[in-house]
Image: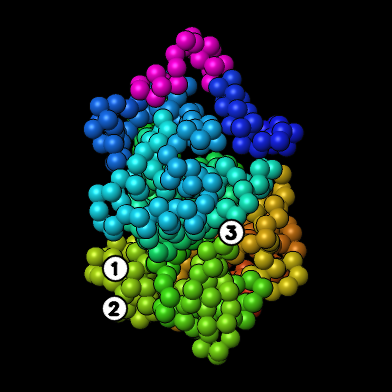
Amino acid sequence: AAVAAHVQSQNNIFEPLAQAVHDQGMAQLNAEFVRQRLSGRTTDDLISESVDESSNEADKFGDGDQSYTRACLPSDPGQHLKNIWCMKCDLVKLCTRGRCPTFVLDCFFGREAEVKAAIAMTKAESEERRQLLEQRVSNCRMAPLHVAIAGARNFNPASGVSFPAGANHFGVVTALAQAGARIESKDIAGYTPAHHATTASSSPPTWKIFRYLVDKYDADPNNYNRFGHLAIQEAAMNRIEPLMETLLDNGADPMLRSKDSLPPGYEHLVTNTQTLVRVWPTGQHLLSQGSLPHRKAKVKEGDKCQIGHLLKRADLNGEQGTVGAQNYATGRWQVTLDSGEQVMVKRHNIVPLNTCNQCGRAAQKKCSLCVSVWYCSRQCQKVNWKTHKQFCQGNKTASSDSSSGSAAQTFTMELGEGGSAAILEGAINYRQNKVTKLSKALPTKGERRQDGKLLFPIKIQVSQDNEALGAAARVLVYNEDRSFHSMPPLGAPSPPSPQRAFLAALGNPPRVYMLAEYDERTRTAAVALARDRVLADQEW
């Protein structure tokens, strides 16, 4: 905000911006240097501590030194490099003062026509073309593709700094990519173009670039930088919901752990994205959605799919159709339903047909017991069996038929049908006995059946006061990631309700894990009180 106010008070927008950013950043760095008794050392001195200068010098048109450098403690050389990188190095200062090659300046300011003209003057796959596209500038060794995205981040209307007239950074990026720029090139800190487009300072214009690079050029959203960190971890730490969703929609893996090599006493900082969202309910829900097997499959135009997880148009869930083009600006995909209707949906609403229940890739074989889920290989089926066996109805039927005892009860307990038994739209804060309101509160981890319903495990927790409460007693029902909650009635104690009779047949346990069904069309959930729906005790 201070930089924006300073810029607006000047006639020349670029020179004051460069000076303000540079001065502010250097003031912060100098304060850190003094605190650590490092004053007198230059920025280049600090950068040289975490890079092999000889490797970088020998690889003028490549990535140079990409070895791991720790950025955990304030005194770590990698932390100094990270601070300098977050200040945009000296790129803004060089570009706004015209101290970069003309081609690089055109990339930074989004001059699409000039960039295309310069590329056209070189022959495809020639050394001249390679050197044009892979030249390195600034003390952070950025290639033109990095510079174009950094320019899009720098001129962010949300920060009060508008794009220059006629700027088209997206057009510059497409021109560079089509000309052969390396999509996975890395700067001095190990940041790829996809990283640059999804940092904490990124914005919708750079997310559009990210979606394009992933869709058209298979850019890897799970690349580690030199500090051992991932883009999705930065989004989680800064609680940027649309960025998290964009990364998950494009293949970011929330289960990957950071690759920090930490000193004794700091091992607990080695983490994955799930750890970072423990106290952020919205982030927890986004990750649970991102963990669905169908999110791992790459979607492309022409694929046959099924619609799922829609809220406002729940009547479309289960409908089949064909995937169309992606709108890179919004991240939504066009799907033409078999009925002829065209809809724009998010990635997690697209369930590719016949995808492996383990890895999400295209599959050809079904589980022989339930004939409801697909696998691409015997290995994937074997790995997934530990999870699938609790959902597999063929396995349940076999074990139920061979077991002794009374016949299974068939009463169905509604978990989300109006009144106080409705699904609670939020996450429960158990200490304060409050419900945190969310816009999305649905069961996410489970398996989809051919009838379109989702099977998912639940925990039924019985109050110790249920006898004293009589007919007013309720049970608490929720799933592992707490994206689903319900409090259905337990029923009358005399004569015992079907719910009470079922629990009594199980020995009145304080908690029981079962398999519930969720119908996306009606947004209702239910559990059949039958022994073949009872699961083994879980750890949650």
Q: Which residues are magenta?
A: 28-49
State left or right for residue 455 relative to residue 388: right
Residue 32 visible in the current orientation: yes
Q: Residues within 10 Å of mark 3 (few under 14, many from 20)?
A: many
Q: Which residue is label 3 attached to?
A: 483
Q: Is residue 474 above or below residue 393?
A: above
Q: Is residue 167 magenta?
A: no
Mark positioned earlier in the residue sequence (1 or 3): 1
Q: Could you tell me the amino acid type at mark 3?
A: Ser
Mark 1 to mark 3 CA distance (whole Å)? 27 Å
Q: Nearer the viewer, residue 295 or 143?
A: 143
- What residue do we see at 44% from left, 13% from top? 41
Q: Is residue 196 above or below residue 299?
A: above
Mark positioned earlier in the residue sequence (1 or 2): 2
Q: Secondary structure at mark 1?
A: helix
Q: Nearer the viewer, residue 156 or 323?
A: 156
Mark 3 to mark 2 CA distance (whole Å)? 31 Å
Q: Which residue is label 2 attached to?
A: 365
Q: Which residue is label 1 attached to?
A: 381
Q: Could you tell me the amino acid type at mark 1?
A: Gln
Q: Residues within 10 Å of mark 2 (few under 14, many from 20)?
A: some
- Judge depth for marks 1 and 2 and give the one in front: 2
Q: Residue furthest front?
A: 121
